[in-house]
């Protein structure tokens, strides 16, 4: 079977990245992780990737200041070098420019900790609690120019309990993310040429 060359973009802990790396060890998984790319040199996920024997790279966004496209051009060059076919954003906390998104349209997915279209952007769990929602969750979606607006591939849900805090809710949702993301990525691979 065809295994698509995968890059995972991270900014921090990398637990979703690790869930994908683990799933991708299966012989019938349709993606092969070729690169983990971080915008933060201190991202804990870089060491986890190295333990999994996946090549890592870092393009620190800070020296680029407000020139987001220059930062992305450097990332794009590294992605091209590795002949990447599909990108999974996994806790990658930079908003991407239309230039980068257009280059990777149909080949880039993201995990977001809400039941999209509810709560794009930040502080999703707090916003769900504040709104009195009965449930929260996570979504994997195609990346388009509008932040967190692309078509949803798959979602998972959990109840919000009366005493929930952001931390307790996040702790309930995170294992669902780890189950959801590898499955949704496999599904996304089916639509690649
Ligand atoms: C995850 O909860 C992910 O859904 C969220 O950041 C966390 C990253 O954790 N992503 C976003 O908020 C994107 N806007 P991880 O580094 O352990 O995977």
Image (cartoon, helix red, strand yellow):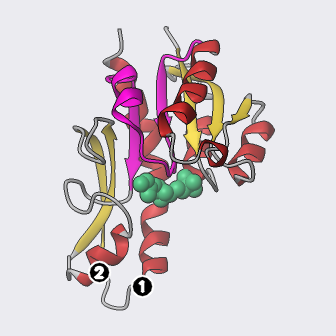
- Residue 106's spot in the image, x, y percent? 32, 23
Q: In this view, does 67 lie to the left or right of 136?
A: right
Q: Does the residue labelled 2 lie within 8 Å of ligand 1?
A: no
Q: In this view, does 81 lie above or below 114?
A: above
Image quadrant where residue 128 sits: bottom left
Q: Distance between the residues labelled 2 and 1?
A: 8 Å
| x 49%, y 8%: residue | 2
Asked whether residue 88 is drawn in magenta, I would say yes
In the depicted view, which residue is nearer to us: 29 or 130? Answer: 130
Q: Is residue 145 above or below residue 66?
A: above
Instruction: Give the mark nearest the N terminus, 2 or 1.
Output: 2
Q: Residue at x 42, y 32 (%)?
A: 185
Residue carrying label 2: 129
Residue 8, visible in the rendered structure: yes
- Residue at 72%, 54% in the rendered image: 44
Q: Which residue is drawn at 61% across and 44% down?
A: 61
**Which quadrant is the C terminus positioned in?**
top left
Q: Is mark 1 on a helix, strand or loop?
A: loop
Q: How crowded is mark 1: few (under 14 residues within 10 Å), some or many (20 or more)?
A: some
Percent of width and height locating residue 99: 38, 27
User: Which residue carries the number 1 mark?
Assistant: 165
Give residue 52's position: percent from left, percent from top. Answer: 75, 36
* Mark 2–mark 1 CB contact (< 8 Å): yes
Does residue 187 appear in the picture of this structure? no
Q: In this view, does 115 lie above or below 145?
A: below
- Whole-percent x, y for residue 49 in the image: 72, 39
Magenta region includes residue 30: no
Near mark 2 (Cα within 10 A), the count class, few <14, some 14-19 or many ≥20, is many
Question: In screen coordinates, is 106 left or right of 50?
Answer: left
Q: What stretch is highlighted in magenta?
A: 83-112
């Amino acid at each position: 079977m065809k295994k698509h060359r995968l890059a995972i973009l991270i900014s921090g802990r990398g637990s979703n990245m690790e869930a994908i790396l683990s799933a991708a060890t299966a012989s019938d998984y349709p993606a092969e992780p070729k690169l983990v790319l971080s915008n933060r040199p201190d991202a804990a996920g870089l060491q986890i990737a190295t333990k999994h024997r996946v090549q890592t790279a870092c393009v620190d966004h800070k020296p680029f200041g407000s020139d987001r496209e220059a930062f992305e051009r450097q990332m794009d060059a590294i992605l091209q070098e590795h002949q990447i076919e599909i990108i999974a954003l996994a806790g990658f906390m930079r908003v991407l420019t239309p230039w980068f998104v257009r280059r990777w349209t149909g080949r880039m997915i993201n995990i977001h900790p809400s039941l999209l279209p509810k709560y794009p952007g930040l502080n999703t769990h707090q916003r769900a609690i504040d709104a009195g929602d009965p449930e929260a969750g996570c979504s994997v979606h195609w990346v388009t120019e509008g932040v967190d607006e692309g078509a949803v591939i798959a979602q998972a849900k959990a109840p919000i309990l009366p005493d929930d805090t952001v931390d307790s809710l996040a702790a309930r949702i995170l294992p669902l993310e780890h189950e959801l993301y590898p499955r949704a990525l496999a599904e996304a691979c089916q639509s690649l040429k």
